[in-house]
Image (cartoon, rainbow, N blue to C red):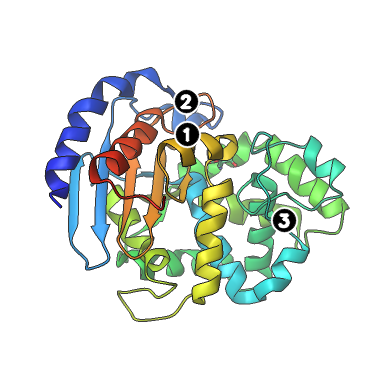
């Protein structure tokens, strides 16, 4: 398969659409990112990499980080985690308060904000320094000892994060946060501010294509069964309220973030990451989703 030629073609076809999306502005520090960026990288399970455009430019991964904290939370708590978080698509915006009230403080899934706040709480409970532990976890996945937090983005989100603060207090009132609300919010905004590029992400997701083993270190991070289930959760809940459309168009488990990144997995074959900051109405990268749709169409490879 000539992945490089396919990526080059996709860049040509998709570039004109980068201006059609809307850069997230509810976190002021994200609003400053130029909308015309486009990068894409593929890493095969054999370790070959292909990339195009701004694939080496770092961006704020935002909710993509929730996949990493889910993996850590499963390592710490195993199936007991599912007494505190559900596994169904939400059918509501990712930061909805209403659903949490109806469902008595049990977030629908780990990838909506309420669910990710519970994951951050679990990581806080089990580590001496949650921010350092998440960073170490991600650095080991992408072999980048300089992967780090963007403190401006973290501060900006904390300053403008009243809705997440409301969700956290709500969770606490239902007994579903065990740590101090401010500590959980601080850990959460830092994980969201992680800065990575498409090449890093296509590498960092490799354990999800390798049955739960980090191929760089040989370390098992999850059982094959947990890996299958994490991929299933990405397919059903990974792209906000657009999971059905994304499965229909792209056909891969994937996780998006409001920074405009999407990372996706074809188990046993490759991981692919794309970045274009302009978002569609559901909050996913507009050109990024198109690029992934073209990728599975042109390669003829998807989980379906
Ligand atoms: N930090 C963002 C928030 O909590 C993450 C949203 C996202 O990327 O989905 O609103």
> Could you tell me if the residues under marks 2 and 1 are in contact, i.e. CB atoms within 8 Å?
yes
Residue 290 position in % (x across, y down)? 35, 31
Ligand 1 found in image quarter: top right
Q: Residues within 10 Å of mark 1 (few under 14, many from 20)?
A: many
- Which mark, by number, is residue 189? none
- Which mark, by number, is residue 86? 3
**Residue 144, above or below 98:** below
- Which mark, by number, is residue 280? 2
* In the image: residue 231, left or right of residue 219: right
Q: Secondary structure at mark 1?
A: loop
How far is the residue under mark 2 from the one under mark 1?
6 Å
**Residue 256, above or below 199:** above
Q: Is residue 29 visible?
A: yes
Q: Residues within 10 Å of mark 3 (few under 14, many from 20)?
A: some
Q: Is residue 55 visible?
A: no
Decide which of 204, 294 is in the foreground and name it: 294
> Could you tell me if the residues under marks 3 and 1 are in contact, i.e. CB atoms within 8 Å?
no
| Residue 80 picture quarter | bottom right
Residue drawn at point x = 70 percent, y = 57 percent: 118
In terms of sequence position, does the residue under pointer 3 or pointer 1 come before the other? 3
How far is the residue under mark 2 from the one under mark 3?
26 Å
Residue drawn at point x = 19 percent, y = 57 percent: 49
Image mark count: 3
Decide which of 304, 184 is in the foreground and name it: 304
- Which mark, by number, is residue 284? 1
Q: Secondary structure at mark 3?
A: loop
In terms of sequence position, does the residue under pointer 2 or pointer 3 come before the other? 3
């Amino acid at each position: 398969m000539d992945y490089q030629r396919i990526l080059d073609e996709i860049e040509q076809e998709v570039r004109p659409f980068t201006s059609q999306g809307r850069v997230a502005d509810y976190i002021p520090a994200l609003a400053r990112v130029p909308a015309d960026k486009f990068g894409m990288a593929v890493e095969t399970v054999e370790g070959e990499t292909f990339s195009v455009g701004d694939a080496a430019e770092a961006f704020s991964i935002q909710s993509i980080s929730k996949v990493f904290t889910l993996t850590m939370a499963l390592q710490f708590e195993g199936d007991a985690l599912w007494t505190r978080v559900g596994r169904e698509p939400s059918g509501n915006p990712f930061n909805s308060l209403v659903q949490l009230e109806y469902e008595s403080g049990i977030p629908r899934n780990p990838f909506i904000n309420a669910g990710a706040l519970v994951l951050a709480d679990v990581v806080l409970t089990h580590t001496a320094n949650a921010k350092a532990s998440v960073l170490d976890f991600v650095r080991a996945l992408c072999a980048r000892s300089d992967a780090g937090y963007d403190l401006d983005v973290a501060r900006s989100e904390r300053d403008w994060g009243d809705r997440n603060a409301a969700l956290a207090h709500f969770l606490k009132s239902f007994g579903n946060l065990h740590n101090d609300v401010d500590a959980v919010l601080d850990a959460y905004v830092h994980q969201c501010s992680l800065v990575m590029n498409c090449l890093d992400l296509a590498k960092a997701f490799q354990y999800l294509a390798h049955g739960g083993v980090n191929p760089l270190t040989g370390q098992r991070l999850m059982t094959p069964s947990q890996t299958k289930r994490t991929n299933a959760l990405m397919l059903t809940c990974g792209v906000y309220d657009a999971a059905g459309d994304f499965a229909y168009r792209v056909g891969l488990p994937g996780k998006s973030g409001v920074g405009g990144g999407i990372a996706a997995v074809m188990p046993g074959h490759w991981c692919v990451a794309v970045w274009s900051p302009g978002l569609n109405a559901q909050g996913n990268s507009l050109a990024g989703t198109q690029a992934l749709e073209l990728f599975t169409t042109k390669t003829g490879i998807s989980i379906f």
